[in-house]
Image (cartoon, rainbow, N blue to C red):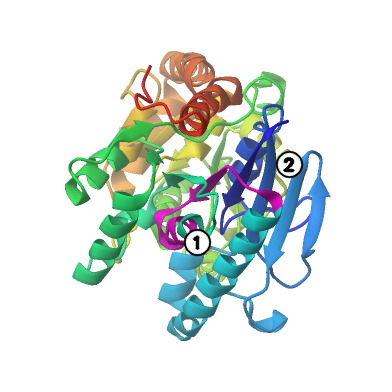
Amino acid sequence: MKKKILVLSSTFPRWANDHEPPFVYELSSRLTDQYDVHVLAPHTSGSKIDEKILNLTVHRFKYAPERFETLAYNGGISTNLRLHPLRYILVFPFILAELFSALRIARKEKIDLIHAHWIIPQGLVAIIASALVRKHPATLITAHGADVFTRQGTLTSALKQFILNRCDHLTVVSQGMAEAVQELKPECNIDIIPMGTDLTQTFTPDDSKRTKPQLVFVGRLVEKKGVKYLIDAFQQLNSLYPDLGLIIVGHGPEKDSLQKYAHTLGISENVQFTGGLPQEDIPAYLQQSSVAVFPFIQAEDGDQEGFGLVLVESMGCGCATLTTDLPAVRDIISDRVTGLFIGEKNSNEIAARVSELLENNVLRENLSKNGRNYVVRNFDWSVIAKSYIRVIACLLHKQIDYHE
């Protein structure tokens, strides 16, 4: 009989063809050959309470009247709290509802391991649920970024340390995050395992679609993505390359303000905002673009990229890729080998580096080739899923050395 895993996440597809990031779904689905996997995620208007998605059993917990279930999704919990402080009143019922649901599933299904994505709140729920269930399932926490980089106050840091002291194992998605966690808890035993993507069938090159010069950005339209600086840079580029287009793929709370900003700068005719798209539609935009630009920044609340999976996806599609030199993306980009680094909040440098790539076909093609080769070797789901399965197997069999 298969061992049973309960996955806790605040980000998960709400329905078919949802534009929410699918990485928790993709990882969880790849565990089902070895394990019986249940997923617990927040409910929201229009989503089902319980459903079967292929071999995954998905449960969604209600934490408020449906029209007020607005804490998760559409930018994520951290962004929603920053933009709408009144939503803090939803935090306690959210955690309580998630805990009760996790306890119910863990007891009914006799769960062997709880895999919590994000230290707070899912990690907290996981360790409490494990303590209250007679079987005491093992606890694995995966940190993604905002849960480490934001809310650095004394009480929150103490809560994070409390959780990390009691979980059985922690994975983080980048070396930069591992260093940040070790500052918080120096003796923490950490595996660095990024999220993966499908680089064999989905995010693949198709040079026949690159018929004209085009820039692309893909991601949530929130402060830490730095899209404003890309729009500023594009204004400079537009005067030099009148035929150049910019496509901004994604949704989020800054979408309307960014569209107005592009209109104010007089470049809206050359800037296309697609809004949120299903994951299956995204590769086409990357395949038809010459250069992908991701001008990430550290947000005012300290939030920053934990890994940058979208870089992997763009490189998989053969885009020459530019991004800010932040700790998390150094696992992916080697400057002028697999991509180009740009300075944080530096629109002039973005414009200069894009112009260099548009003028230098050899450099652009080398970055495209090297970048694709690197991500296929290191970030395809065939590689990443095996790493998570190894850690889970060690936890379930109570082995001490997770690095064998």
Instruction: Pinpoint residue 359: horizontal percent, then vertical percent.
Output: 43, 24
Q: Is residue 116 magenta?
A: yes
Closer to the eye: label 1 or 2: 1
Could you tell which of marks 1 and 2 lies nearer the N-terminus? 1
Instruction: Pinpoint residue 138: horizontal percent, then vertical percent.
Output: 48, 43
311 left or right of 229 in image? right
Foreground residue, 223 or 307?
307
Which element carries disc 2, helix, strand or loop? helix
Inspect this view and state whether residue 226 appears: no
Residue wearing tag 2? 281
Foreground residue, 52 or 298?
52
Residue wearing tag 1? 132
Instruction: Pinpoint residue 362: horizontal percent, then vertical percent.
Output: 44, 13
Neighbourhood count class around disc 1 (C-alpha, 10 Å): few under 14, some 14–19, many 20 upward: few
Which residue is drawn at the image coordinates 69% and 70% (left, top)?
44
* Number of marks drawn: 2
Which residue is drawn at the image coordinates 34% and 51% (left, top)?
166
The magenta stretch is 109-128
Q: Is residue 56 magenta?
A: no
Which element carries disc 1, helix, strand or loop? helix
Which residue is drawn at the image coordinates 47% and 29% (left, top)?
391
